[in-house]
Image: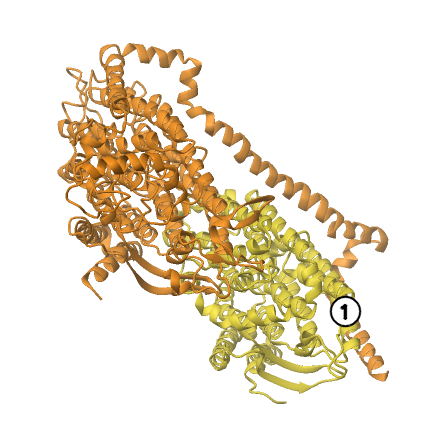
Amino acid sequence: MTFQEYAAIFIVLAPGIAAAISGLGQRFLGDKGAMTITTALVVGAAALSGYLFFSQAFGHAGVSQTIVLSRWFDVGTFIADWAIKLDSLSITMLFVVTSVSALVHIYSIGYMAEDPHRARFFAYLSLFTFAMLMLVTADNFIQLFFGWEGVGLASYLLIGFWYKKASANAAAIKAFVVNRVGDFGFALGIMAVVFMIQPAAGVDYAAYGITEFSSLKFDTVFSVIANNAPVQVVGTAVAVPIQEVTIDFLNFHVWGLEIAGILLFIGAMGKSAQFFLHTWLPDAMEGPTPVSALIHAATMVTAGVFLVCRSSPLYVETEVASNMITVVGATTCLFAATVGLAQNDIKRVVAYSTCSQLGYMFFAAGVGAYGAAMFHLFTHAFFKALLFLGAGSVIHGMHHEQDMRYMGGVRQPMMFTWAMMLVGTLALIGFGIPGTDIGFAGFFSKDAIIESAYASSDAFGPFAFWCSIAAALLTSFYSWRLMFMTFEGKYRPNPHAHHDDHGHHDDHGHDHAHAKPKDGRAPAHESPLIMIAPLAILAVGAVFAGVMFKPFFLTKYADDYWNGAIVREADPLYGPHGIHPYGEATTEGHAPAEAHAPAMSNAAASAAEEAHGAVAADEHAAPADGAHAEAHHELPAWVVWAPFIVTMTGLIGAVIFYLMAPSVPRRMAQNGGPMHSFLSHKWYFDEIYNFVFVKGTAALGDLFWKVGDKKIIDGLGPDGVTATAKAGAGGLSKLHTGYIFHYALVILLSAVVFAAFILVGQGR
Amino acid sequence: MTGPMLLTATTFLPLIGALLIVAVRVTAGANAASAASKIIAVLATLATLVVSLIALSQFDASKVGYQLVDYAPWFGGSSYKLGVDGLAISLVVLTTALMPLCILQSIKSIEDRLGEYMICFLVLETLMIGVFCALDLVLFYVLFEGGLIPMFLMIGIWGGKNRLYASFKFFLYTLLGSLLLLAALVYMSIVAGTTDVPTLQAGLHPETGALLFPPEVQTWLWLAFFASFAVKLPMWPVHTWLPDAHVEAPTAGSVVLAAVLLKMGGYGFLRFSLPMFPEASLLFQPLMFALSVIAIVYASLVAFRQTDIKKLVAYSSVAHMGFVTLGIFSFNEAGIQGAIFQMISHGVISGALFFCVGVIYDRMHTREISFYGGLVHRMPVYAALFMLFSMANVGLPGTSGFVGEILTMVGAFQANTWAAAGAALGVIFSAVYMLTLYRRTVFGEMTNEKLFDIKDVTALEFFILGLLAIFALGLGVFPSIVFDLTETSTTEVLRMIGQ
């Protein structure tokens, strides 16, 4: 085994071992021991992941292999291993997950310092990390599902970490159940894949690079799809090329790949809190803040995006499913941004912003820009974790005040946190100078997504584009609103002084009878070094992750970096047929690629003229080293500048409303116009769901139980018989006393009758 | 008698234990019997476990057909014939492995008439093992029905307040099934001239070689067998006896009922209905799918509204057994392998959940959900174990619960997407009722004063639940342990049904 393989095994298993040791041995280890072990192992995993990631990128290692640990399932073609798949996609995720997790572990040592259940907390954090790593390194759908549900469990346990709190318990269950609604789709998606990906007799699958035919392994499934190999669907007699397979799902006769794509995406919607299945994410803020940073911002919620990118060979072939992803993603990005405008809880604002950014990632994947989706996932992890941990620092410094209405004037006492939050905000709104490579991380990834939507020839590309522009405006506005309400102006003490109604265990024993505010400064204190050091590291990522890695995720080295881990063929912007082509087109024509034909020829022509520093050159697409600036010729200038302009507009709006005339929005909120209550009630989703699903389920359960079981089944069955027997035989007691003996008698009699029959039968 | 006698030994060792206790009871009186019964029962069940494991080691999973056959002629066309295939031996080992745990639990929690209780329990074990080993229809019938008598007694004597109603309900339902099964059996033995199971499975007359049961006859015979197995399993709508029986039964009785007795129904379908009446089985597939999906959705929703912990777990059992019938009647490898696995897995998980209920019942003598709350503050180890089994019951991947559910659904999807989609709804609802139960009992503030000095699990309870936890996780991560054993049985069933 190579060093890489050892490293990968260590990275994945170390957090699991850490969780087991600190979870089972907390009595012996104590809090300190548990924290040390979990943090050390996760930091070790992060270091090795960093090594893998940087050598994959800067060293052009091009790793693409699978390490099989053990066989899990082997039933017919339902074959799956416990395995570690190492390719650029999983290595990128390994780096994101372990580095954010390591920083969150370190941060939590400070944040949870006073909590009596720290060992349990760190065990859960490591358990989560383990499950997430199993998810991203899966080489088949079932292991992915294992990680998928595993992170769901860890999320449930961590949201409900303060289990005394009724609201935390409710939020934990809500998160798990809503995710399960998504998993309902995911599980059916897996079933649909297994149903279709069945070997046809007489087909040499080895020719497609398939050594062992498994209906679950990515290698098999995606190779069959990409090669349009013939398969023999269960219950049919003839082999059909996979892209032409139709199946009957429920009462619909549909394209098989489309339905599989849609069902898998429903799973992604649940995990990534997309429109209709987003309601759990804001409530998940009940958990400790480091949890929100790790799980509900940087990693777990991006699993859905990861799933779609992992399945990119499937989604490039499915027009309807991809359009659905585009529409849902675009709707979510705008919807969540509108709700973010009217939230007062600092964590909820960031939560809705996460929801919105996930929408960006999805519609990017929907239009085929998987590289941009992954790139935004990557940069977002840093700046969103930064924002959450920064918010946690504020909450910590403000003695567990989370309501921004009762903040203000926090900048002076918490200068460092303010600076870090500022970096995070600039990265989130995608601040940068269009046409140059100057900007924060979000600038590179977000603008790439917005431009991809514009460049896309998909039916819903324009819809996604306009949603994303509008959302960018709102993002800027609510982000600055958060900054200004929290840090600027005068301190606004909470008249209800509800320090303790959060019931946190982690009250850190600071003197609550703090001094009256003077000079409008908030009575806050800067957080300890162990908490702000991770902020600084994340801030480095929030600044540089974009400019450093754009060549690998999107442009110059993208083909080399991805090495087939995602399909770049259909990328409308940077794909080989895109507006700024980077990379080599494969010879066989993909449907989406053909749709881009005009753009491609243009781009190829212009790129060919300026071809220098060839990575690979052919007639379809020339590498365009440093072509970024010139290539903007094909995108109208207003498209390139639109995100910048709306972002500035948002900033100006926020300055007016929250710095210059803060009474205006306050009065608007107090008067509570219909628009305001619509937004502050989050479009009434919770109210509607509560009425339809929660109450509906309970009512149906009661109906089945009290009417179905008791009245109808028992009433006609045993109770009815009893009543009849009572009437007929003159007393239930008689039956009661003798029933066992009656039964024995029945058996005895039957045996006699039976013996008689046998004898009669033999006599014949 | 011919044969290696391993199965005979496995079957009758518990009975010998029971007879020993009877002997002590007769010679030295009830008190001495109570004392002696503890040791005898533990030793008898352990010895049975050891012998069954020896049988397992002698069993060759790759061979087709029944193995370790013990044979002695009986009367008429019937015989004393024991033998196992992969399906049977895995259920036998499930039974023998759970029994010592049940005995250990009972020693602590049964205070009244322990000697008689142990006799009852050991007889029950003999009958249950016999059911899975019997290769003669008459022998099967006697053991199958006989197994109910100790169960009646257990509910009727050591049960709760409403035990008479519960056992009466149990009796009515099973009586209905038994009589129809008996009628079918009589007819079959007359037609075939034998009650030998392999012969009947082959479906051809042993002498003339003619088809034994033409399709229209199969339909009636299938329905008669169905009546009996559906009650045992139990399937909707003949399930209402189960919650009552569970509520009244002592803890170990519930464990055995859920873990082993329910499996007799699924076993019956696989051993008899499918191989002996293949045409009828295919004919009734839509019915079975409908009933399975109704069971999953309906029972899950009812479970959600329960106020009694045991009733909740009982309804959850009904839902989970729905996956078994769903898988069996998918008529494909994934479905049947999944169904067998689900039976084993449900045996472990539901057994563990009833043990969990027993832990707090022994301390507080109530199963009302509303009585509890905040147990985690006093019982952290219990909370962790209960969480693990809740998650296994919810079908979290990595636990055994997932393996059975996903495979049966994959199997069902290939036969009918509606059935698969309906069953997948159960995946959502199981999370709803299980997490709600957990939150109401374990999480939250501890407000009930009576709970304030409740103690965490004892060493014995930890041992029992820990062992089951290892099984639930081990089977979830390495399900091939079971699959390797049952693969040949599955392909045999599929071959017999012509799929």
Query: Please, which chain is the residue tagged with disc 1 on?
Result: B
Can residue A273 be seen in the rendering of this structure?
yes
Q: Residues within 10 Å of mark 1 (few under 14, many from 20)?
A: few
Specify whether A568 is left or right of A273: left
Specify whether B425 is left or right of A589: right
Q: Position of residue B76 (x, y in %)?
A: 76, 83
In this view, B118 is above or below B391: below
In this view, B153 is above or below A341: below
Q: Position of residue A26 (x, y in %)?
A: 27, 54
Q: Nearer the viewer, residue A114 or A462?
A: A462
State which chain is coloured yellow: B
Q: Quadrant of residue B250?
A: bottom right
Q: Residue at x 75, y 63 (%)?
A: B219
Q: Position of residue B131 (x, y in %)?
A: 62, 72
* Disc 1 secondary structure class: loop
Q: Nearer the viewer, residue A519 or A613?
A: A613
State which chain is coloured orange: A
Q: Which residue is mark 1?
A: B214
Label 1 sits on what residue type? Pro
